[in-house]
Image (cartoon, helix red, strand yellow):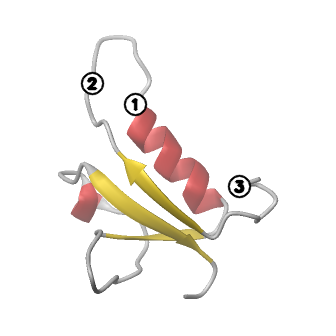
């Protein structure tokens, strides 16, 4: 559904934990959504959509939106 563009908004709980030999699920999920045209924001009353970046590496929750809000 995500690849087909049928999901507009996604609320994600991110786990940035790193362990030896394990993939980073949060980074993989963000990369997947970026490739699908999603932008990201901190959760809250006022959403500020932007490209993924180091700004949310300390967040445990993020909102993703596909297309132009």
Looking at the rendered structure, the number of numbered marks drawn on it comes to 3
As drawn, the residue found furthest toward the front would be 45
List x then y, in percent, for residue 62: 35, 60
Which residue lies at the image location 34% right of the left edge and 43% below the top edge? 14
Q: Which secondary structure lies at badge 3?
A: loop
Left or right: where does residue 69 sit relative to residue 21?
right
Q: Position of residue 15 (x, y in %)?
A: 31, 36
Residue at point 44%, 33% (across, down): 25
Q: Which residue is mark 1?
A: 24
Instruction: Give the answer, above or below, for where 10 lies relative to 41.
Output: above
Quadrant where the C terminus lies? bottom right
Q: Residue beneath label 3, please?
A: 2
Q: Measure the alpha-carbon separation of dots 2 and 3.
A: 26 Å
Q: Do callouts 2 and 1 mark residues in contact (Cβ within 8 Å)?
A: yes
Q: Is disc 2 placed on a helix, strand or loop?
A: loop
Question: Which x, y percent locates residue 44?
Answer: 26, 75
Write down the residue under mark 2.
Answer: 18
**Marks 2 and 3: CB-CB under 8 Å?**
no
Q: Residue furthest right?
A: 4
Q: Earlier in the sequence, mark 3 or mark 1?
A: 3
Relative to residue 12, is residue 68 drawn left or right?
right
Alpha-carbon neighbours of circle 2 within 10 Å: few (<14), some, or many (≥20)?
few
Q: Tell me the crowding category of disc 1: few under 14, some 14 to 19, or many 20 or more residues within 10 angstroms, Cα based.
A: some
Q: Quadrant of residue 18?
A: top left
Q: Nearer the viewer, mark 3 or mark 1?
A: 3
């Amino acid at each position: 559904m995500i690849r087909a563009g049928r999901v507009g908004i996604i609320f994600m709980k991110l786990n940035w934990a790193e362990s030896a030999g394990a993939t980073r699920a949060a980074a993989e999920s963000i990369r997947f959504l970026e490739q699908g045209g999603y932008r990201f924001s901190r959760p809250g009353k006022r959403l500020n959509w932007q490209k993924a970046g180091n700004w949310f590496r300390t967040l445990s929750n993020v909102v993703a939106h596909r297309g132009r809000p």
